[in-house]
Image (cartoon, rainbow, N blue to C red):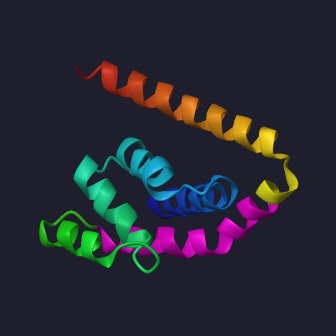
Amino acid sequence: MELFLLIFAGVLSGICSGLFGIGGGVVLVPFLVYFLHCNQQTAVGTSLAALLAPIGILAVLTYHQQGFVDWKKGMILGVTMIFTSFLGAKIGVTLGSDALKFSFGVFLCCLGVYTLLTTYHKL
């Protein structure tokens, strides 16, 4: 089941990356925290591992040194993102600018409400 969830998260992140220019911090970190029950630091470190080549090796190494990187999850996510980000990009270039901007705003609002609701009950 974990492998399926990781592949799903990689696909979702890849599509969102190609469509909205986002992926790791906005999609993967919340997914890893809420659906795979990683702590926040491990989610950030693992997300960075998935984005290691194009983003920031120094940031990943810093999280890794503190034990906050799950390399297996990071690699599965990274591979699925490689193969699905083009799908999001294809959708993004066919939408009008206003439709894309609106879609991105709805996505961020939904993510924000979800994050607030799932965090609020823990306070």
Q: Position of residue 63 (x, y in %)?
A: 21, 66
Q: Is residue 96 left or right of residue 68?
A: right
Q: Residue furthest left?
A: 66
Q: Quadrant of residue 110?
A: top right
Q: Could you say which is closer to the camera, residue 21 or residue 86?
A: 21
Q: Could you say which is closer to the camera, residue 45 or residue 108?
A: 108
Query: Measuring 26% from the left and 75% from the top, which residue is drawn there?
Result: 58
Q: Position of residue 52 (x, y in %)?
A: 39, 76
Query: Measuring 12% from the left and 66% from the top, which residue is drawn there?
Result: 66
Is 83 contained in the magenta span? yes
Q: Is residue 44 left or right of residue 83?
A: left
Is residue 92 placed above or below 103 in the rendered structure? Answer: below
Q: Could you say which is closer to the camera, residue 30 or residue 100?
A: 100
Query: Measuring 26% from the left and 67% from the top, which residue is drawn there?
Result: 69
Q: Is residue 70 left or right of residue 95?
A: left
Dominant secondary structure, magenta: helix
Q: Residue furthest front?
A: 97
Q: Which residues are magenta?
A: 70-90
Q: Residue furthest bottom?
A: 53
Q: Position of residue 114 (x, y in %)?
A: 48, 28
Q: Is residue 95 left or right of residue 14?
A: right
